[in-house]
Amino acid sequence: MIEFERVSRRFGDQDALRNLNLTIEQGEMAFLTGHSGAGKSTLLRLLLLLDRPSSGDIRVNGEPISKIRSRMVPR
């Protein structure tokens, strides 16, 4: 399961995502559609750990994505 809870991402004074709440259950498919600048790429960058949210929580199978990120850092 992937959960975005009140996730926001700002670039300067511009909101790319604002208070996003989204749950994708295991086995579900999700499609992202929207106009240019709607935040589709930003959402994917957050999920792929290429960027960090300005606020809010992202969890994968109930585990905060920050813990997953820390395990991926080479030691």
Image: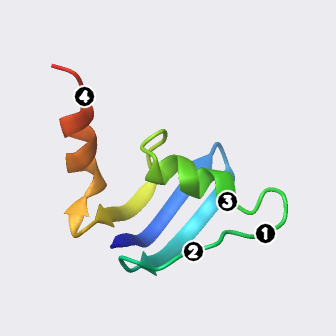
The secondary structure type at the circle numbered 4 is: loop
State the count of labels: 4
Looking at numbered disc 2 in the image, what kind of residue is underneath it? Ala
Q: Look at mark 4 in the image and give the residue it sits on.
A: 73
Q: Quick one: label 4, few (<14), some, or many (20+) residues within 10 Å?
A: few
Q: CA distance from mark 3 to mark 4?
A: 26 Å
Q: CA distance from mark 1 to mark 3?
A: 7 Å
- Amino acid carrying label 4: it is Val
Secondary structure of residue under mark 1:
loop
Disc 4 versus disc 2: distance between alpha carbons? 28 Å
Q: Residues within 10 Å of mark 3 (few under 14, many from 20)?
A: some
Q: Earlier in the sequence, mark 1 or mark 3?
A: 1
**Label located before the other in sequence (1 or 4):** 1
Choose between 20 and 71: the one closer to the eye. Answer: 71
Q: Residue at x 30, y 63 (%)?
A: 60
Instruction: Measure the alpha-carbon separation of dots 2 and 3.
Output: 12 Å
Q: Which residue is mark 2?
A: 30
Farthest-out residue, right: 35
Residue at the spot of label 3: 40
Which residue position is annotated with label 1?
A: 34
Q: From this view, report whether residue 69 is shown above or below residue 23.
A: above
Check disc 1 and give the amino acid type: Gly
How is colour applied across the structure in the image? rainbow
Q: Nearer the viewer, mark 2 or mark 1?
A: 2
